[in-house]
């Protein structure tokens, strides 16, 4: 089952984990967890430090695990765009407080989320992070 989800691990099955790449290590950790057939899987920053192609692959696999195994997945992730693409429901935390929650589709369409977490301003124009005033974000949610 694990090799079905992570075919990149097949060629590494006789290799020590310390010789694996970051993406392979992430796959290995997830594979080890899946062997216990969990009902709930908590993933903390699975995309941290990985190349964009590997990030897309990891998120595709996370979605497959949820759909095929029926495993509930709690995903803590700063890559809001990728997380909201696969999530059913989301929470936005800022400074340790939940400031917004809802179905992922609603969060993706929320103007504050689009501006501050997805980098998309009014009219769909991409915004630079340096153009965003952090105090505006905090004031909107108080």
Image: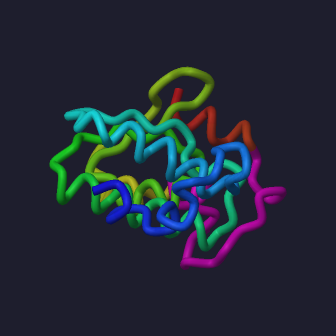
Above or below — where is 39 with respect to 6? Answer: above
Of all residues, the one furthest to the top in this rendering is 96
Residue 96 falls within the magenta-colored stretch: no
Q: Nearer the viewer, residue 76 or 23?
A: 23
Of the 4 image quadrants, the one containing the N terminus is bottom left
Q: Nearer the viewer, residue 2 or 122?
A: 2
Q: Residue at x 52, y 36 (%)?
A: 44
Q: How is the image coloured?
A: rainbow
> Measured from the top left, where is residue 14 in percent x and y?
57, 54
Q: Residue at x 45, y 38 (%)?
A: 43
> Measured from the top left, where is residue 91 in percent x and y?
40, 37
* In the image: residue 112, left or right of residue 127: left
Of all residues, the one furthest to the right in this rendering is 130
Above or below — where is 24 with respect to 60? Answer: above
Above or below — where is 71 with respect to 54? Answer: above
Whether residue 73 is visible here, answered yes or no, is yes
Whether residue 112 is visible here, answered yes or no, is no
Quarter-wise, where is residue 140 in the image?
A: top right
Q: Count the labels in the image.
A: 0
Of all residues, the one furthest to the front in this rendering is 14
> Measured from the top left, where is residue 7 in percent x and y?
44, 68
Quarter-wise, where is residue 83 in the image?
A: bottom left
Q: Residue at x 20, y 34 (%)?
A: 39
Above or below — where is 57 with respect to 112? Answer: below
Q: What is the span of residues highlighted in magenta in the rendered image?
A: 112-133
* In the image: residue 6, left or right of residue 94: left
> Measured from the top left, where is residue 132 in percent x and y?
75, 54
Q: Residue at x 77, y 58 (%)?
A: 129
Residue 132 falls within the magenta-colored stretch: yes
Q: Nearer the viewer, residue 115 or 84?
A: 84
């Amino acid at each position: 089952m694990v090799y079905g989800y992570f075919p990149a691990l097949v060629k590494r099955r006789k290799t020590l984990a310390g010789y694996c790449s970051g993406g392979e290590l992430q796959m290995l950790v997830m594979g080890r967890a899946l062997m216990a057939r969990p009902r709930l899987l908590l993933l903390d920053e699975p995309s941290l430090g990985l190349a964009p192609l590997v990030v897309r692959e990891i998120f595709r696999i996370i979605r497959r695990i949820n759909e095929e195994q029926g495993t509930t997945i709690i995903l803590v992730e700063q890559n809001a765009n990728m997380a909201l693409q696969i999530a059913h429901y989301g929470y936005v935390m800022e400074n340790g407080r939940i400031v917004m929650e809802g179905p992922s589709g609603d969060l993706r369409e929320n103007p504050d989320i689009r501006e501050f977490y997805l980098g998309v301003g009014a009219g769909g124009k991409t915004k630079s992070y340096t153009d965003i005033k952090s105090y505006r974000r905090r004031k909107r949610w108080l």
